[in-house]
């Protein structure tokens, strides 16, 4: 799936840099889009005042979504993603710094495909992101969004 991009929604600048580095190491051809809050993610996915169109969905292969985001939290974004026929099929991996069982349960209840607790150790975090990228960008298959809309 190297031709697809990966959307990273995370408000922590350090985690953004590490995640992008690991994703690029795992899949050099996949563009990485970084957004910082839940509202930006919804605007990107569904169009907003400044974003314009839903054509962003055509090249998207997976979403890495932080649970704790400013403006609109990751679980609310996930709820919107799963409630729209345009995006309800899209792989969403929830990522969190905390190990809250209630967040884990809620993420899966809302339809997350995976839930990852960020490793604190730099090398372990890089390994997590590399493994995650290799699976979702090279092993997993997603339908083309145009095909999904036709069904």
Image (cartoon, rainbow, N blue to C red):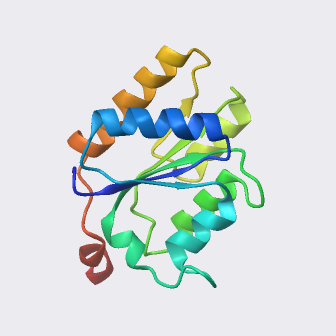
Is 131 left or right of 138, judged from the image as shown? right
Marks counted in the figure total 0
Q: Position of residue 70 (x, y in %)?
A: 76, 54
Q: Position of residue 11 (x, y in %)?
A: 67, 47
Is 50 left or right of 136, judged from the image as shown? right
Is 93 left or right of 38, judged from the image as shown? left
> Compared with residue 80, is residue 111 higher up or lower down, i.e. above or below?
above
Rendering quarter of residue 3 = bottom left
Quarter holding the C terminus?
Answer: bottom left
Q: Residue at x 57, y 14 (%)?
A: 121
Q: Position of residue 69 (x, y in %)?
A: 71, 50
> Compared with residue 54, is residue 121 higher up or lower down, i.e. above or below?
above
Q: Residue at x 60, y 69 (%)?
A: 42
Residue nearest the observer in this picture, 100 or 42: 42
Is 133 left or right of 100, judged from the image as shown? left
Q: Position of residue 109 (x, y in %)?
A: 59, 48
Q: Residue at x 59, y 28 (%)?
A: 117
> Compared with residue 63, is residue 87 higher up or lower down, i.e. above or below?
below
Q: Residue at x 25, y 63 (%)?
A: 143
Residue nearest the observer in this picture, 114 or 11: 11
Residue nearest the observer in this picture, 63 or 109: 63
Residue nearest the observer in this picture, 74 or 114: 74
> Compared with residue 114, is residue 59 higher up or lower down, i.e. above or below?
below
């Amino acid at each position: 799936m190297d031709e697809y991009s990966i959307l990273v929604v995370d408000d922590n600048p350090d985690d953004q840099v590490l995640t992008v580095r690991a994703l690029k190491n795992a899949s050099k051809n996949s563009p990485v889009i970084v957004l910082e809050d839940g509202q930006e993610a919804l605007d990107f996915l569904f169009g907003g005042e400044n974003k314009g169109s839903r054509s962003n969905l055509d090249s998207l292969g997976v979403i890495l979504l932080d649970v704790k985001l400013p403006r609109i939290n990751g679980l609310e974004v996930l709820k919107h993603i799963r409630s729209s026929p345009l995006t309800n099929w899209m792989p969403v991996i929830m990522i969190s710094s905390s190990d809250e069982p209630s967040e884990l349960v809620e993420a899966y209840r809302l339809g997350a495909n995976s839930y990852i607790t960020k490793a604190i150790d730099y090398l372990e975090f890089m390994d997590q992101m590399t493994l995650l990228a290799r699976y979702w960008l090279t092993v997993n298959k997603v339908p083309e969004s145009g095909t999904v809309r036709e069904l």
